[in-house]
Each structure stands twice: as C-alpha cells, then as structure tokens.
Amino acid sequence: MTGNESIRLERLTDLPDRGAALAGLEEIFFASTTRTEFASAADRAAFLATWTGWFVDDAPRDIWMAVAADGQITGYLTGCKDSAGSVELARRIPKYEVFADHFAAYPAHFHINVRPGWREHGLGRRLLDRFAEDCRADGLPGVHLVTAVFARNVGFYQRAGFTEACQRGPLLFLGRRLC
C-alpha cells in the first residue's frame, strides 16, 4: 500500500476500463459485506445487483472510485441524488422507505466501501466529501445514509458532519446539511 495522496478519485464514467473498475468494485463489495455464504453463483450475483446494480445502471456518474497509481481500485462510493424519485431503487433495496420522510431535507444518499488494507487512511472520508461537494454543486440541501444503530461506522459519519440522526428499530438515519 502507498500513501493516500497517491490515490485519485474518478467517476466511474471517466475511467477508461469500466469492466476492470466494476471488477474492483465487486471485489471490495464482497470483502466488505457481512454476508459471506450464498446458495449459488446466481444468488451471489443477485445480492451484488441488489446493492450496486441500480447505481451502475442508472447513476454511473454518481459512482466515485478511489484509484491507486497502479490502477487498482482501492475504494468506491455509489450515490443517488434523488432518493425520493428513485422508485426502482426503492423496490430493490430492503427497508428503503423507512426514512422517506427525511428525503426532502436530505435527498441524496450513498454507500461506501474501501478495500481491506486501505481502510483507516482517509479514503472513505475523501470519497464522502467528494460526493457531498458534487451534491452541493447541484444545489442539493443535504445527504444521508442509513446504517445499523450499533455499527462501528457511526462514529466515522458523525465526525464527518452527519449530525441529524433518527433511529427506527435497528436502523439509524444520519444526515448532513450541505447548505
């Protein structure tokens, strides 16, 4: 691993080898998810499609990739700038609608994963801040994420300015104002 400063952030749509970038995203996704067993290759592919497919198909400009000097994908952020208007995404992702009453104030949301070995070096924060800057430039008032109440990432997001919080069952909504 090299220093964080050697990592560049690129939109998926700006990368010359989209297939290699998506292969890197898939590797990182499965290295990061808590689900490790699948009944079949089709079940595994369906799980990936649930959590990343809409972003790749419908919002590829809102996917930010952290790319090392050697071209390795070290992290990614999948983003959606219109949570309320993304009907297909709501159909795919379980419990998507639980915090729909907060979508007007925090219309954008995202998911971040960083490759093991590159974690805790500021890449997640750089990806998050880049997406937030992009949302702010588009005039969006806020961005949010949903995580588990006791997830270890809660402190990370609070330090990154996600101060609006709402708990519903085991889920925690965290929002960050952009204007």
Image (cartoon, helix red, strand yellow):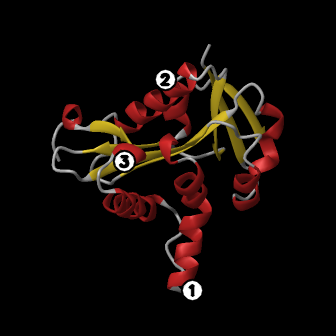
Q: Secondary structure at mark 2?
A: helix
Density class for disc 1 (Cα within 10 Å; few <14, some 14-19, many ≥20) is: few
Q: Residue beneath label 2, please?
A: 133
Q: Mark 2 and mark 1 in contact? Answer it, CB < 8 Å.
A: no
In this image, 96 relative to 48: left or right? right
Name the residue located 54 percent from the left edge and 20 percent from the top edge.
Answer: 137
- Earlier sequence position, callout 2 versus callout 1: 1
Asked if residue 169 shows in the view, the reply is: no
Q: Where, by quadrant of the figure, is residue 122 drawn?
A: top left
- Earlier sequence position, callout 3 versus callout 1: 1
Name the residue located 69 percent from the left edge and 58 percent from the top edge.
Answer: 93
* Towards the viewer: 169 or 175: 175
Give the vertical position of 116 relative to 130 (above or below): below
Q: Residue beneath label 1, please?
A: 39
Q: Secondary structure at mark 1?
A: loop
Q: From mark 2 to mark 3, how far is it between C-alphas?
A: 18 Å
Q: Where, by quadrant of the figure, is residue 139 drawn?
A: top right
Q: Residue beneath label 3, please?
A: 75
Q: Mark 2 and mark 3 in contact? Answer it, CB < 8 Å.
A: no
* Towards the viewer: 62 or 94: 62
User: Most extreme residue toward the top, as rendered?
Assistant: 179
Asked if residue 115 shows in the view, the reply is: yes
- Earlier sequence position, callout 2 versus callout 3: 3
Q: From mark 3 to mark 1, how far is it between C-alphas?
A: 27 Å
In this image, 106 relative to 27: left or right? right
Amino acid identity at mark 3: Gly
Q: Position of residue 7 (x, y in %)?
A: 24, 38
Q: From mark 2 to mark 1, how far is it between C-alphas?
A: 40 Å
Q: Position of residue 104 (x, y in %)?
A: 78, 28
* Towards the viewer: 60 or 77: 60
Amino acid identity at mark 2: Glu
- Name the quarter where the C terminus is drawn: top right
